[in-house]
Amino acid sequence: MTSGWNESQKTIRPMLSRWLAAGFGLGTIMLGAPGHADTSGAYYESFGDFLQQTKFHGNLRSYYFSRTYTGEATNQYAYSLGGYAGLLTAPLYHFQAGLTLGAANSLGLNPVNPAQVDTTLPGGTVWILTETFLQYKHKYFTLRGPDQILDTPWVNPSDSRIKPSAYRAVYGELTPFADYAPLKDLSFVGLRVFEFNGRAEGSFTPTNLYFPGHAGGSPVSALYGKSTPGTLAFGLKYGSPGKPLTAHLWYNKFIYFSRLLWFDGSFVQKTGTGFDPLFGFQFGSQWNDGDNLLAQVGQGAAGNSQIYGVLAGIDTPYVRLTAAYNGITRQNGAFGNGALLSPYTTGYATDYLYTTQMIGGMIEMQSPGSAFKVAATSYFMDKQIKAMVSYGGYYITPTSTFTSNPYETNVDVTYSFSKSSGLDGLSIRNRFGWQNGNIQRQDFFYNRLQIQYQF
């Protein structure tokens, strides 16, 4: 099953390396050309002009985690300092190159006993080029690859530690109606993932979070030594952040795991009064994908399951209030009795279900059933302070890990320094989660303190 993938690597990697070399070579030639930069960035007056239009980005994070349990589990803590820094070159005939380095180091501050270290942070030293890609970007079309950070509902960055997850992939997006105002926010997307880099790791591998070896995730021990060719996905997107209406329709083929058809839409009614109702709807249908790896190791293939979700709330000048529901249908004999499979978020609690909390949600519990979540978010001091409180309750088929009614409470507070203070980009965030319903851990108290400088 994996021999074809290994052979394809021998062809794909040298080819992509040649693309990158060609892109940088083109840049060297064109920097010296006379004239002015046009919309494709064909010409630059000087190397300084090129650098001025190159975009630099990054952040620095100091993170401290503590896990405390009342049951039979070892309390853990971890510290890590790191972040990421990168650039996206100015365009040259619509071509751009991207480079991002992610790194983390514990500074020797973590426990000597590995069992006492929260390795999801990461708890040791990590560095990796999370992004090394060549991109062709036109008004109507974008093509990018190979190593990059992707942001789709089920192939996403999961950026809640030091660095985001990354993917060795090819990504394409078509925007054919960019000149037609009513449909300018409509785009068609296709992507093919070959390898995965978890948020706490220093390498790309042909695996996902159901395979052992990842920091976090939901490892199935019997998958040790196996691999997957990755993921194929196609999507239709409408809208953009801040717009009243957004919608996503996706088909994901998680090769040898599952197939997922997914719709997610939201609408905010702008009333002009500051009190704006908001609504959301989710629907998914999951089924098995061919020669299923989970079935091969006796865990049961992906179930023929349906996923539902609704969200309603109101956004006011003082607070945003929301209430949400998710349901997953049951299928006996399937993996997790029909649990929704999410190969790149399971164990990370970064999926797009409305009811997922900081510590976990229905995907982490690996069980069908239903869930609800209520949340309140408010801003203070001219939005320098953001405070969020939420409660989630789950009604699931009991598993070897969870009872039939786990619940979780979250408190999340962020203070951002004002621009006038000279510390623009610096923030302090503390997240606290309390989960109950884990049979072994019982009460689980999770605190995360983050100091971040964004540049």
Image: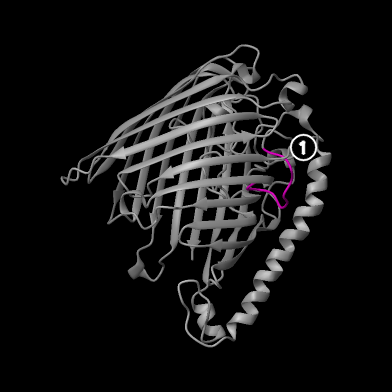
Whether residue 346 is visible here, answered yes or no, is no
Query: Where residue 70 appears, x then y in whole percent?
Result: 57, 27
Give the image quarter of residue 345: top right
Q: Pinpoint residue 281: horizontal percent, then vertical percent.
A: 38, 30
Q: Residue 51 occupies which quadrant of the picture?
A: bottom right
Asked whether residue 311 appears in the rendered view, the answer is: yes
State the SS at label 1: loop
The range drawn in magenta is 198-208
Q: Is residue 173 above or below residue 447?
A: below
Left or right: 372 as drawn, with respect to 447: left
Tell me the crowding category of disc 1: few under 14, some 14 to 19, or many 20 or more residues within 10 angstroms, Cα based: some
Spot occupied by residue 372 in the image (x, y as percentages of width and height): 41, 24
Magenta highlight on residue 200: yes
Q: Residue furthest top?
A: 332
Q: Nearer the viewer, residue 207 or 121?
A: 207
From the viewer's perspective, tell me whether residue 239 is left or right of residue 63: left
Residue 351, position in %: x, y?
Answer: 52, 36
* Dominant SS type (magenta): loop
**Foreground of the two, 155 or 28:** 28
Farthest left residue in view: 273
Please report the residue visible at 68 percent of the width from the left and 38 percent of the height from the top. Answer: 208
Pointer 1 residue: 227
Observer-nearest residue: 321 or 99? 99
Q: Is residue 323 above or below residue 197?
A: above
Q: Quadrant of the N terminus?
A: top right
